[in-house]
Image (cartoon, rainbow, N blue to C red):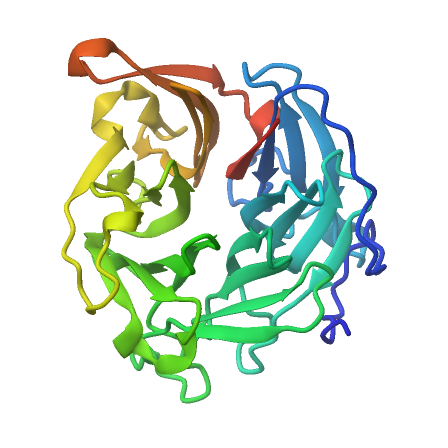
């Protein structure tokens, strides 16, 4: 059964629980979740939240679908915002975490369905900050910001269960007694079904984020069962498991904060099964200090650091291809799709900006690679 939906619904969505028809993918494709651009105090173009398709070269950009609010004409022109994107290969479906909840679509953007929303009561709709599909279990895992919970549900949004409380307590700094949000929330989630571990990034503010994990069995045992794998991270976001290793995005908090893609410098199978803190070494795959592509000036001349929001990795035999998206959406909108490779002899990464036209890549917050 679907949770109670807020009055602000999407005009373009239907509420069928049936999974969309699988769409055949004949060639490699990149899918971008664009959060859209709303009203600003300065005159800038506005557009709705959307899903976009591009080739791995950043060409042939196509808007697959736009999500709009079913209210008056003014509100329908505003974006509903977006936070995370994930792809289910077993069902050929995309799941977008938006400002109105999780929306499921086919890979061509059709059959858009609002499958669930989170109501925190005190704060209204709770922001869903992260999303991941466990393919064998056929469950969607997601994180909520206000409550600081990780939950899971069937792929149609039904049978919601609380998996883990990752809040680390309430943020008592808020003056309102009725509004005490969680101290931390899951900025990214990934489930390792082979080994039975749930990994997430605990996000909050400057330099106090961390990467954690807990066993899928016995996750109701409280924080004493959480393992802290890395700490001191500036707003960690998306996490992915690639080739038996864990990677994550360090988004940076402000427009001048460093941004990076980092990883644990140890294979996941080699991690200790017990203990609350592993104090592991980390490595840096990509960092803003490595390229000028991360910096732009807005219309006032102030320098902005474009934050990495999402990345994908395609591994084929010995070849590894990495794409990531960066954005800054202050007074001026910036969005870029970037591919990175590595030279031999440890000489560092080579960056290629594939597309930096915001009319084509939007303001990207999610990226998936479809084969």
Percent across and percent down for residue 150 are: 48, 68
**Residue at point 34% right, 68% down?**
184
215 is higher (above) or lower (below) than 176: above
| Residue 257 visible at all | no
Q: Is residue 65 left or right of residue 204?
A: right
**Residue at point 69% right, 53% down?**
103
| Residue 221 visible at all | yes
Percent across and percent down for residue 204 are: 32, 62
141 is higher (above) or lower (below) than 176: above
110 is higher (above) or lower (below) than 344: below
Quadrant in the picture for residue 232:
bottom left
Q: Quadrant of the N terminus?
A: bottom right
**Residue at point 30% right, 49% down?**
269
Q: Nearer the viewer, residue 185 or 253?
A: 185
Percent across and percent down for residue 166 are: 37, 71
7 is higher (above) or lower (below) than 270: below
Quadrant in the picture for residue 276:
bottom left
Q: Is residue 107 left or right of residue 260?
A: right
Quadrant in the picture for residue 252:
top left
Percent across and percent down for residue 95 are: 64, 49
**Residue at point 33% right, 72% down?**
183
Q: Quadrant of the C terminus?
A: top right
């Amino acid at each position: 059964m679907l949770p109670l939906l807020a009055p602000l619904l999407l005009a373009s969505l239907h509420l069928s629980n049936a999974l969309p028809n699988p769409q055949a993918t004949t060639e490699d494709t990149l899918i971008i979740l664009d959060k859209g651009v709303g009203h600003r105090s300065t005159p800038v173009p506005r557009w709705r939240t959307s899903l976009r398709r591009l080739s791995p070269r950043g060409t042939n950009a196509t808007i697959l679908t736009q999500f709009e609010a079913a209210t008056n004409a003014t509100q329908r022109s505003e974006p509903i915002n977006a936070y995370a994107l994930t792809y289910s290969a077993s069902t050929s479906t995309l799941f977008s975490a938006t400002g109105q909840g999780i929306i499921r679509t086919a890979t061509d953007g059709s059959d858009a369905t609002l499958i669930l929303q989170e109501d925190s009561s005190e704060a209204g709709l709770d922001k869903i900050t992260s999303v991941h599909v466990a393919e064998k279990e056929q469950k969607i895992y997601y994180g909520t910001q206000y409550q600081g919970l990780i939950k899971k549900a069937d792929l149609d949004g039904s049978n919601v269960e609380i998996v883990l409380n990752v809040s680390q307590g309430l943020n008592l700094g808020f003056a309102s007694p009725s509004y005490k949000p969680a101290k931390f929330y899951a900025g990214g989630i990934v489930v390792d079904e082979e080994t039975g571990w749930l990994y997430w990034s605990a996000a909050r503010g400057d330099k106090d984020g961390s990467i954690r994990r807990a066993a899928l069995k016995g996750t109701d045992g409280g924080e004493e069962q959480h393992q802290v794998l890395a700490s001191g991270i500036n707003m960690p976001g998306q996490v992915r498991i690639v080739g038996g290793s864990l990677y994550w995005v360090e988004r940076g908090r402000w427009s001048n904060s460093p941004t990076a893609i980092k990883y644990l410098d140890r294979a996941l199978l080699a991690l200790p099964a017990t203990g609350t803190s592993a104090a592991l070494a980390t490595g840096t795959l990509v960092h803003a200090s490595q390229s000028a592509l991360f910096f732009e000036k807005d219309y006032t001349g102030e320098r902005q650091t474009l934050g990495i929001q999402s990345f994908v990795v395609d591994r084929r035999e010995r070849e590894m291809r990495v794409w990531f998206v960066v954005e800054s959406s202050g007074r001026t909108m910036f969005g870029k799709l970037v591919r990175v490779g590595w030279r031999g002899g440890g000489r560092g990464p080579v960056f290629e900006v594939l597309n930096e036209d915001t009319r084509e890549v939007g303001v990207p917050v999610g990226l998936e690679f479809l084969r």
